[in-house]
Amino acid sequence: MLRMRHRVIHVKDGMAVNMDNRKVVLDRAQVKKAVQALQAFLKTKSTGESLLLDETQQISLLFTLWKIPKRAQTIRIPLPHGQRPETDEVCLFTRDEPNMTPDQTQRFYKKLLEQRGVKCVTEVIPFKMLKKEYKPYEAKRRLLGNFDLFLSDDRVRRLLPSHIGKHFYERKKEPLCVNLQSKQLARDIQRIVQGTVMKINNKGSCCMARVAHSGMTADEVTDNIEATVQTIMENMRAKGPLIKVIHLKSLSSVALPIYTSDLSHLTVIEDVKRQGRKAKEEKALKKKNKMNTTEGKQTNAENHEENKAQPQDDEVEEDDDDEEEDEIPQLTPIATPTKKPKLEKTLKKKTLEKAPKSAVAKKAKTANKLGKKTDAKV
């Protein structure tokens, strides 16, 4: 274990890991051995009956992360040595210049690139030409297969996805933005063409970046590998230990490990998780305290208002008591008759009115009978 600048560094299998979680220092000799082994494999690998090396075969770095990132990220990586051979075809999409036909704008931008010293762009396609000539599905697939890299004017970049189709993005050949109004246009395009891009996806813990091609020397490939690892560690948006394993591979080879993180990273991961839990608990406590303080303030205000209102109520009650002593009001019940009682009362009244009539009639009948009987006797 070594101590350098107050930072703990563990050494394992010729590889040093900086425990500040922002630097992974690779042993150059170890990486170079892996590159030489890969190049020897590519030379001895037979393709059919021949033993020829495919110079355009890609060499990539495969990164395995400790955990799945929360957000997707795209990192542009400038490389000290160009990772694309000169035979690669590059296409540039430009905007439509006013008062010019598509052919005129194509000539205009070709002259501009020649004047600025840009030699890596092989084809220029204005936006109108892209919409008209490459509208069918077969034409888009042909365009995708004819070129290895696509560049686009930053003024037209947002219009391209709806016209080029999803296959450019599935094959990871989406156009890269270029500022054609830049004073150092040749340098900017060279950095983009000879550099690389790594896309960190939030759906898995593995990501890959193209670093070199099989026609490069071992020293050039190792330089590109070191630059790639350094820029990724500096620009990656994550906390705690980042990279678990780094492999070197080609399209047809086995992945060769060039870096394996120490198991001491596990303690760092646990510490990071504990810190995250503590932070969440502190946030929850702060919220509870805020809620309690606001509720306490509200209750205090309500109590204060009630205390203010109490003496006035007592005075009113005293005045009411004096009035009650002076005068004793008589309470009169207020009847709120419903529909049904009204009907019952009316029925009772009708029966009462009819009852005396019937009694009088009976008496009259009995009297008449008695009178008739007396008259008969006489």
Image (tube, rainbow, N blue to C red):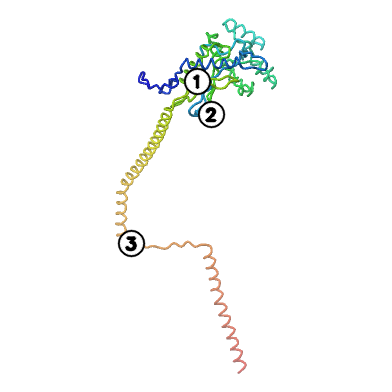
Can you identify the residue that label 2 sits on? 204
Q: Nearer the viewer, mark 2 or mark 3?
A: 2
Does residue 40 appear left or right of residue 314 in this picture?
Answer: right
Residue 320 locus on image (x, y percent): 32, 55
Q: What amino acid is found at the position of numbered circle 2 in the picture?
A: Gly
Residue 174 locus on image (x, y percent): 59, 20
Q: Which mark is residue 328?
A: 3
Disc with the residue nearer the chain's start (3 vs 1) = 1
Q: Is residue 230 above or below residue 358?
A: above
Residue drawn where x is 47% and y is 61% of the image: 336
Query: Spatial distance from mark 2 to mark 1, Cα to Cα?
Result: 21 Å
Residue drawn where x is 54% and y is 66% of the image: 343
Q: Quadrant of residue 37?
A: top right
Q: Tag 2, which secondary structure?
A: loop
Q: What amino acid is found at the position of numbered circle 1 in the picture?
A: Ile
Residue drawn where x is 58% and y is 7% of the image: 118
Q: Nearer the viewer, residue 183 or 228?
A: 228
Q: Nearer the viewer, mark 2 or mark 1?
A: 1
Q: Tag 1, which secondary structure?
A: strand
Label 2 close to label 1 by CB (< 8 Å)? no
Q: Is residue 153 above or below residue 291?
A: above
Residue 57 locus on image (x, y percent): 60, 16
Residue 254 locus on image (x, y percent): 57, 22
Q: Residues within 10 Å of mark 1 (few under 14, many from 20)?
A: many
Label 2 close to label 3 by CB (< 8 Å)? no
Can you identify the residue that label 1 sits on? 258
Query: Is residue 90 in view?
Result: no
Q: Nearer the viewer, mark 3 or mark 1?
A: 1
Does residue 163 appear left or right of residue 27 in this picture?
Answer: right
Tell me the quarter of the image containing the N terminus. top left
